[in-house]
Image (cartoon, rainbow, N blue to C red):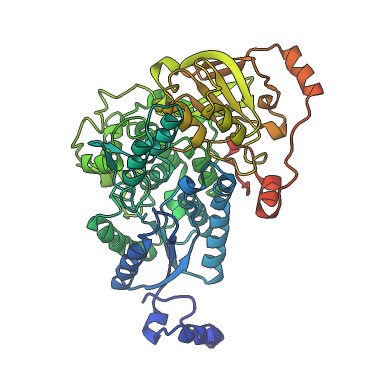
């Protein structure tokens, strides 16, 4: 008979007395104790509906013979945190989420877990926790937002940010901006493009930790509620079969995730999160792997911001499983890996049909023969940097121009919105890395301003910070080493020529080695002095971006 750790023995009587205080019956105390990790809150649109998902999961767990018990996880809305000091607190929550969930799960000896994430750092944070705790676990997200509609066209949050740039450039009226404001984000759910939240929820499916549709079924669909009930039932099957996260999140599973990442055109933030999750599984992901996989993986999807399709369109076309099925036709994925269905990935995708070849290109006719993300290396980024190649205009895949250097996001935005950036420039924003920021802020505001002004095909942006999945254009982030740690980016000067060659994975500051060494001798690195609290501890502990901005190295 299924039973939990506390159900028998006089020595467990004190714990059972506390379960009595919770109102539990004897029958509930006898069943496996299943923790339901709820990321519900009332400030993040992607999380405001999670209470409904929680109720459905509880129903599924109870139907399948478990006792569900809910406890919380935090989440930050990157869109609300964007463009001000609040963004320093986004990436750092990934580790807070992992740490606090680990503490709750192990302190209360749960037999199994259902994780209910949705937005950005919440997803990888809970995947990291799942790997640490390593009890049977299923993920079910809150689901993506439906696309907005402005002037007869589908739209999303990235268009909203770009509208602000267009207004600053005199290309859009205040009334037009207000129309975007009122219509870009029409429902609850994670923002409707292939931004970070949806990227990570889709990759959760690929890793085998979520059921079919986890990444794509819209938040407002009743199908999402049915999925949540199935997740609750599925975790009980995993419990009985003793299938655990580290049985599922294997080296082969992470190779699948990197491959699907390239095919889907996921956010560059996946290059921070996949290594961090893998690290918790005792698996090392070197960013060079990304280029190796990208070289053989075609890009099959152009969802916003790379194109004008949205998560609801991907869902209708067959979802993540349809993409995986296309990749399997050329043996690009491992089909023998285990998943939370209790079946292999190959069994899961067997017979899945690609219903819309405009949304998911057939493997024989991709958008490009190489994947959506590229990792660049050169003297400006000796330890690599990352760009979402699928969202770069063809004419910007190679670019050479003079540097315009800023020591913070705020400095850059002021000049960009003031019209101080011209075609051909390479904007460099530094001291925004994991340790130097601290917190590695997203640069959606400056990239959107550039795009909104119509300069996305003429101006590149390079930073030791990172980008939103909503960013498009030649936006190159995660420059490592970062400025505060003496990376080359700290020594770039206004007017220096920077050469970018994305097809050949290179980025070069065109000065001599001798000149660079001289600058290193004569340049004082900037370190922020007014850092306190969690950010101070984080800045002292965090790794570089190329290692996944991790705290715990295993």
**In front: 154, or 351?**
154
The x, y position of residue 250, in whole percent, is 45, 45
- Vertical placement of residue 198 versus 387, above or below: below
Badge count = 0
Residue drawn at point x = 57 percent, y = 24 percent = 427
Q: Is residue 253 left or right of residue 300?
A: right
**In front: 412, or 334?**
412
Q: Residue 413 lies in what quarter of the image? A: top right
The x, y position of residue 189, in whole percent, is 35, 52
Q: Is residue 256 left or right of residue 525?
A: left
Q: Residue 199 lies in what quarter of the image? A: top left
Residue drawn at point x = 27 percent, y = 47 percent = 348
Q: Is residue 210 visible?
A: yes
Residue drawn at point x = 48 percent, y = 48 percent = 80
The x, y position of residue 548, in whole percent, is 57, 40
**In front: 287, or 197?**
197
Residue drawn at point x = 56 percent, y = 44 percent = 84
């Amino acid at each position: 008979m299924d039973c939990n750790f506390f159900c028998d023995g006089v020595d467990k009587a004190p714990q059972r007395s506390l379960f009595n205080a919770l109102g539990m019956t004897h029958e509930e105390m006898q069943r496996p104790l299943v923790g339901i990790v709820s990321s519900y809150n009332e400030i993040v649109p992607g999380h405001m509906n999670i209470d409904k998902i929680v109720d459905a999961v509880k129903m599924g767990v109870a139907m399948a013979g478990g006792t569900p018990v809910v406890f919380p996880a935090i989440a930050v809305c990157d869109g609300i945190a964007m463009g001000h000091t609040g963004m320093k607190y986004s990436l750092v929550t990934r580790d807070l989420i992992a740490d606090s969930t680990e503490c709750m799960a192990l302190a209360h000896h749960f037999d199994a877990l259902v994780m209910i994430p949705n937005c950005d750092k919440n997803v990888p944070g809970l995947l990291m926790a799942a790997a640490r705790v390593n009890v049977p676990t299923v993920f079910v997200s809150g689901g993506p937002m439906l696309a907005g509609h402005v002037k007869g066209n589908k739209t999303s949050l990235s268009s909203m940010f770009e509208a602000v740039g267009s207004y600053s450039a005199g290309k859009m009226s205040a009334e037009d901006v207000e129309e975007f404001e009122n219509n870009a984000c029409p429902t609850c759910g994670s923002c409707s493009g292939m931004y970070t939240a949806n990227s990570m929820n889709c990759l959760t499916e690929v890793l085998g930790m979520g059921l079919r549709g986890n990444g794509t079924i819209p938040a407002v669909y009743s199908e999402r509620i049915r999925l949540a009930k199935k997740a609750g039932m599925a975790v009980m099957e995993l419990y009985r079969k003793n299938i655990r996260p580290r049985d599922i999140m294997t080296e082969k599973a992470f190779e699948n995730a990197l491959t699907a990442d390239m095919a889907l055109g996921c956010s560059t933030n996946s290059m921070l999160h996949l290594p961090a999750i893998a690290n918790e599984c005792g698996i090392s992901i070197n960013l060079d792997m990304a280029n190796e996989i990208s070289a053989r993986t075609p890009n099959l999807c152009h969802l916003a911001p790379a194109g004008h399709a949205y998560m609801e369109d991907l869902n209708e076309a067959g979802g993540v499983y349809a993409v995986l099925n296309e990749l399997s036709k050329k043996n690009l994925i491992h089909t023998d890996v285990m998943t939370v269905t209790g079946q292999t990935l190959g069994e899961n995708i067997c017979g899945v049909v690609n219903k819309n070849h405009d949304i998911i290109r057939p493997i024989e006719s991709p958008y490009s023969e190489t994947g959506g993300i590229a990792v660049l290396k050169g003297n400006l980024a000796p330890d690599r940097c990352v760009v979402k190649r699928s969202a770069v205009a063809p004419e910007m895949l190679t670019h050479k121009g003079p540097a315009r250097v800023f020591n913070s996001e705020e400095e850059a935005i002021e000049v960009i919105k003031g019209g101080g950036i011209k075609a051909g420039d390479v904007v460099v924003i530094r001291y925004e890395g994991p340790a130097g920021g601290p917190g590695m802020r997203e640069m959606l505001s400056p990239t959107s301003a550039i795009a909104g002004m119509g300069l996305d095909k003429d101006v590149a942006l390079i930073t030791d910070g990172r980008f939103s999945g909503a960013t498009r254009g030649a936006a190159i982030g995660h420059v490592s080493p970062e400025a505060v740690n003496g990376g080359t980016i700290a020594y770039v000067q206004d007017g220096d020529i920077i050469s970018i060659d994305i097809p050949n994975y290179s980025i070069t500051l065109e000065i001599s080695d001798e000149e660079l060494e001289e600058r290193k001798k004569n340049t004082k690195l900037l370190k922020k002095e007014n850092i306190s609290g969690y950010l101070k501890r984080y800045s002292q502990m965090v790794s570089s971006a190329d290692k996944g901005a991790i705290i715990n190295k295993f």
